[in-house]
Image (cartoon, rainbow, N blue to C red):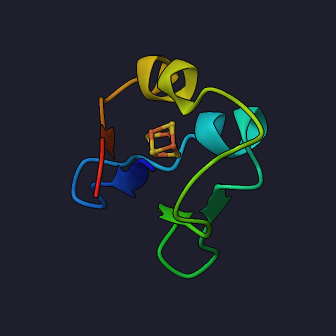
Amino acid sequence: MSKVKVDENLCIGCGTCEALCPKVFKLDMDSGKSKVISDNCEECDCQEVVNSCPVNAISIEEGK
Ligand code: SF4
């Protein structure tokens, strides 16, 4: 099972990840940054979301 992470120091809150996979990513209204609301995604291949982030703030840890 893989684990998705957002580096909030890098995130610019563009909303792309939430648009692509709303089950895993949600923009936090207070911080304006994306938060991971589900540890893993079985709905889509979040690798595409990783590739779509303009600042490479998203990473996927494999295994564990
Ligand atoms: S795509 Fe990247 S920069 Fe945009 S909201 Fe998601 S994590 Fe933040």
Question: Does 33 sit left or right of 19 as displayed?
Answer: left
Q: In terms of depth relative to the viewer, which is nearer, 29 or 52?
A: 52
**x 71%, y 31%: residue:** 44
Q: Nearer the viewer, residue 32 or 6?
A: 6
Could you say which is closer to the camera, residue 41 or residue 23?
41
Residue at screen point 22% across, 58% down: 9
The image shows residue 15 at horizontal and vertical percentages of 63, 43
Q: Name which residue lies at 61% across and 39% down.
A: 17
In front of the other: 30 or 42: 42
Image position, residue 59 (x, y; %): 31, 40
In this rendering, the answer to whether 24 lies above or below 52 is below
Which corner quadrant of the image does residue 8 belong to? bottom left
Find the residue positioned furthest to the left. 9
Looking at this view, name the residue that lies furthest to the bottom. 30
Determine whether 58 is above or below 39 in the image: above
Please tell me in which quadrant of the rendered image residue 56 appears: top left
- Name the quarter where the C terminus is drawn: bottom left
- How far across and down, in percent of the image, does residue 61 sit? 28, 45
